[in-house]
Amino acid sequence: MNYYLIIKLLISASIIVAVSELSKTNRFIGSFLDSLPLVSILSILWLYKDTRDTGAIADLSMGIFFFVLPSLPMFPLFSWLLKKGVNFYVSLCAAILLLNLCYFLANLVYKKLNLI
């Protein structure tokens, strides 16, 4: 059994659960913690521990940067739809559709500019 993989899973999942539980009582701190690139940082840490390949980590870091940008419009759309009274799941699906569209368009642009 791969105990290292289980440890990585437990640490990563624990952070997600802790932030979601904290968000129930303190939306400001929950939002702040959610905005931190915890998944990215954990991915970078795990990749470094596993490979010690700083070139791969540098490439991953820039890839993360370029794909954070098109993900941002999803959040204001989701918030706006909810505030307009649109059903939660419909709002979430619309926001995810926008996210996918933005990723698709960004990917086209980034490839054309040789950024990724």
Image (spheres, helix red, strand yellow):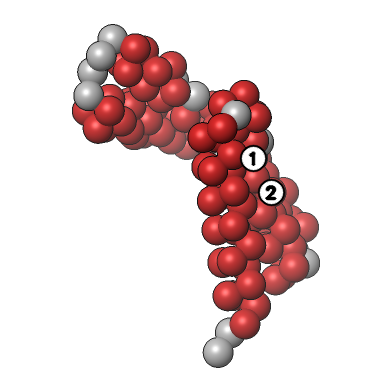
Give x and y (percent) for residue 22: 59, 39
Q: Which residue is mark 1?
A: 37
The numbered mark at residue 85 is: none
Q: Which residue is mark 2?
A: 41
Q: Amino acid at mark 2?
A: Ile
Q: Nearer the viewer, residue 68 or 110?
A: 68
Residue 23, above or below 73 = below
Give x and y (percent) for residue 34: 58, 35
Badge 1: few (under 14), some or many (20 or more) residues near its Cα, within 10 Å?
few
Left or right side of 59 for 100:
left
Which residue lies at the image location 55% right of the left edge and 58% below the top edge?
13
Identify the secondary structure beneath mark 2. helix
Badge 2: few (under 14), some or many (20 or more) residues near its Cα, within 10 Å?
few
Residue 101, above or below 19 = above
Give x and y (percent) for residue 47: 67, 63
Whether label 1 touches label 2, CB < 8 Å: yes
Give x and y (percent) for residue 38: 64, 45
Identify the secondary structure beneath mark 1. loop
Quadrant containing the N terminus is: bottom right
Left or right side of 30 for 102:
left
Q: Nearer the viewer, residue 93 or 71?
A: 93
Q: Nearer the viewer, residue 102 or 96?
A: 96
Name the outermost residue toward the bottom.
1
Q: Is residue 93 visible?
A: yes
Which residue lies at the image location 63% right of the left edge and 62% below the top edge?
11
Q: Amino acid at mark 1?
A: Pro
Q: Is residue 34 visible?
A: no
Which quadrant would residue 87 be assigned to in this image?
Answer: top left
Number of dots carrying numbers: 2
Mark-to-mark CA distance, 1 and 2: 6 Å
